[in-house]
Amino acid sequence: MAYFDSTLTVGYYDAFGVDHIDHTYALVAHGSDTYAFPCYGDFATSTSGPGARGNVNVKYPVDMWTPYMIGSQNVGSHRPASLFVALGMAQFRFDPAYNWRVQDWPEGSQIGGVACWGGIVYGVSGVCQQVCNRVLWSTVDNRFNETPVNWPPTFSATYWVYGYYGKTTEEIAARVAFDLVKLAPFMPIPQTIEGNSGFANRAAQPGAEAQLLDIQARHAAALRESLRQPMAAPERQLEIQHLIEVSQAQAEPTAFARAAPAYNPQAVLARDTAFRVRKTELDILLLRGEVSRDEYATQVNQAFQHLLAELQDIMPPVVFDRLFPEYTAARPVVLVNREQMPESYDLLPAKLML
């Protein structure tokens, strides 16, 4: 059986009809069937008509890009992929339980909410954009940190917080992806959208259930550790310095010469740290069930909007505009979309309660 047995495409649209909130998703064509990966939301198969599924300003298919802030290359709108790896990565398990054929998808179905999560706890370790980019790991069989990304206009904001693929649990996700690659030649594709019960083919991978439980435990531990010990200041300062230097290198020399005085890296780091401390506090309260989803989304988005306003004041304009092209003071950047948050965080497969 060929590893690359399908073709993957991606798109995005205005989430819930709201401009500047880009919901991303992936579709995988396999033979005569197309499979949908809604990534904590919905999907669309065309830009208008029934295929848009009521979504607004659908962009599909769109080009994918290599994951580099400088020198990113357009890799086109269609990529060879493994359907089994895409399904397994989206469901974050070795025996994908749902097949998600487009023709079987009930109108308004919520099956893709938590089920299509890619190991990303929505809002905490990433949003739909990071989930979608993890599904794109099905387009390679190694070096997952170099796979293409779906890059809508608002991706720059979520990248600042979560990275390309949800960096707090990226190492654990890569282990899942490697194991899915090994299993791909042996494991069947689920036949019903309702899902399978248990492992579809236990003989294909002895001890797979125990391995899955181990992955879930490691995933929960990695997330808990990230909440208890956020990224160290020196490490984050190097990351921020790299982002700003990359943006400077991309700017027109004459434009940069007219920019504001050089930024103070310590000032940028201090404001970024204050945001991360506040977000981590809210993450813990959310996972403990001590703050509502409405309050969590409101507080995180307000804190992020405040961070952007501060960064705009202390960064050279051409740098800030390249890092956050969608930002305006009059139009809040929505980092966490309340409507895409799962109904109950304690039902996630990885048992993430603190």
Image (cartoon, rainbow, N blue to C red):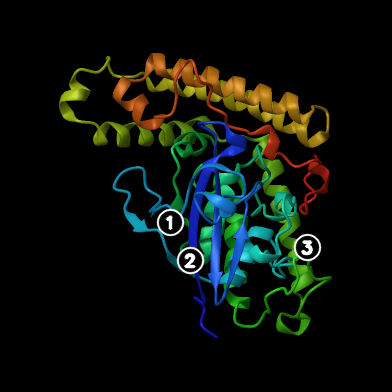
User: Which mark is first along the chain, 2 or 3?
Assistant: 2
Sort mark 1 into few (<14), some (14-19) or many (20+) by Cα contacts within 10 Å.
many
Q: Nearer the viewer, mark 3 or mark 2?
A: 2
Give the residue drawn at x 22%, y 24%: 256
Residues at circles 1 and 3 in contact by the CB criterion of under 8 Å: no
**Nearer to us in this view, 84 or 232:** 84
Asked if 89 appears above or below 277 in the picture, the reply is: below
**Could you classify mark 3 by the number of other residues whose Cα lies within 10 Å: few (under 14), some (14-19), or many (20 or more)?**
some
Q: Can you identify the residue that label 1 sits on?
A: 148
Q: Which residue is mark 2?
A: 139
Give the SS element for disc 3: helix
The amino acid pointed to by label 3 is: Leu
- The N terminus is located in which quarter? bottom right
Q: Nearer the viewer, residue 130 or 214?
A: 130
Q: Earlier in the sequence, mark 1 or mark 2?
A: 2
Q: Considering the numbered disc 1 on the image, is that residue within a helix, a strand or a loop?
A: loop
In the rendered image, residue 71, in percent from the top left (x then y), is placed at 29, 47
| Residue 336 image point, x, y percent | 62, 33
Residue 166 seen in render: no
Residue type at mark 1? Pro
Tell me which residue sits at (54%, 56%) in the image. 45
Residue drawn at (27%, 31%) of the image: 248
Q: Amino acid at mark 2?
A: Thr
- Residue 208 lies, with reference to residue 133, above or below; the image says below
Numbered badge on residue 213: 3
Give me the C-alpha separation between circle 1 and circle 3.
Answer: 29 Å
Question: How far apart are labels 1 and 2 at the CA level?
Answer: 8 Å
Graded by Cα atoms within 10 Å as few (under 14), some (14 to 19) or many (20 or more), the crowding at tag 2 reads many
